[in-house]
Image (cartoon, rainbow, N blue to C red):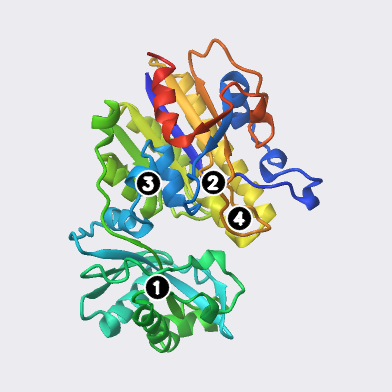
Amino acid sequence: MKYVILIGDGMADEPIAELGGSTVLQKARTPNMDYIAAYGKAGLAQTVPEGMHPGSDVANMSIVGYDPKKYYSGRAPLEAASMGIELDADDVAFRCNLITIEEGMIADYSSGHISSDEARELIQAVDAELGKDGISFYPGISYRHLMVTKNNFGAETTCIPPHDVIGEKKEDHMPKGKDSKILGELIDASMPILEKHPVNLKRIAAGKKPGNSIWLWGQGGAPAFPLFKDLYGKTGAIISAVDLVKGIGTYAGFDVIDVPGATGYLDTNYKGKAEYALQALKDHDFVVVHVEAPDEAGHMGDTKAKIQAIEDFDEQVVGTILHGANAMTEDVTILVMPDHPTPVHLRTHTSDPIPFAIYSTNEKNPDNATAFNEVDVRAGSYGTVYAADLVKIMLQRHT
């Protein structure tokens, strides 16, 4: 048996009036996910433990079989692992977004989804000016970058994700608590460096949002993960354009597979991810495919874009995997799910249970679920499960 986990980041949502009270998953055309729900078994999964922030870090750790209550130490350390940044025992990694500030307000958490090449120049400029006294900045992908501090500096500071406070005053959401004064000063000091940088001047001239401030959040020290192979006795590979998810794979001991044209945005290479996953199944037991696009549309508050992202995920990722799995000589078990809801009217994550469905190419006893969405999976046989148990559930179906 081979195993595939397909994650449509943020696909789950809430009923929307303009859709006649349907969710985007109910409205979107998803014949392949519906097939998996109808011919497999379905239910709801709690990916975010009670009391924990509903971040993609916590949710995706759960899905890959690592209980966040036991293993979670912060978002940024996972991204550091993907970027090849080794953290010492007293290092603290922070997510360092490039954001857009307009008239003192947080206008865009992604600087208009700035390109990686442009962002690299901006982060390097910040590091040249502010990277000293045990503080270093590292360029990542698009708006997602890292700052690393020494001596556990900032580990206990309260920091807010920028996508949670779009349209709100910057000063109301600056770091708070221990070490917050210096962290706030770093954010403020980045602004004159970035505002006058040629990259931003060109973006403004072209009508694009500038990356005119850094924003620090999601910090933590290096986690201690047991290898997936030691936990579950299986080899694995992971495919994503997002450093956070790649970092989870790195700590799990998975092979991290890069796909040309995978962007972490609406224009990502959906089909390429699926094709690389099918290839990876030849020499791996588990393959995880993560697609960020629905989540990005949710953060944008764009219902139409989110429906399109879900339909692209269904057709090009789920459909390609389903067709390829049914053609394989070995049996394949496929789990499809979001990691958390990203309701378009909230433009941020919630911790509500999300729909999931599991189908095997040798499936013989489907349950009563008929479609893949927040409502129809409630007729499934799994009820509500803890997401960190899903890997075990997949394995136990065939033991």
The image quarter containing residue 197 is: bottom left
The residue labelled by disc 1 is 118
Q: Amino acid at mark 2?
A: His
Relative to 356, 398 lies left or right: left
Query: Do labels 2 and 3 touch, CB within 8 Å?
Result: no
Query: Do labels 2 and 4 touch, CB within 8 Å?
Result: no
Q: Residue at x 35, y 30 (%)?
A: 286
The front one of 9 and 62 is: 62
Placement of 2 over or under 266, stated as above or below: above
Instruction: Provide the secondary structure element on which disc 1 rests.
Output: helix
Residue 340, numbered label = 2
Q: Name the residue furthest top.
A: 364
Disc with the residue nearer the chain's start (2 vs 4): 4
Q: CA distance from mark 3 to mark 4?
A: 24 Å
The residue labelled by disc 3 is 259
Q: CA distance from mark 2 to mark 4?
A: 11 Å
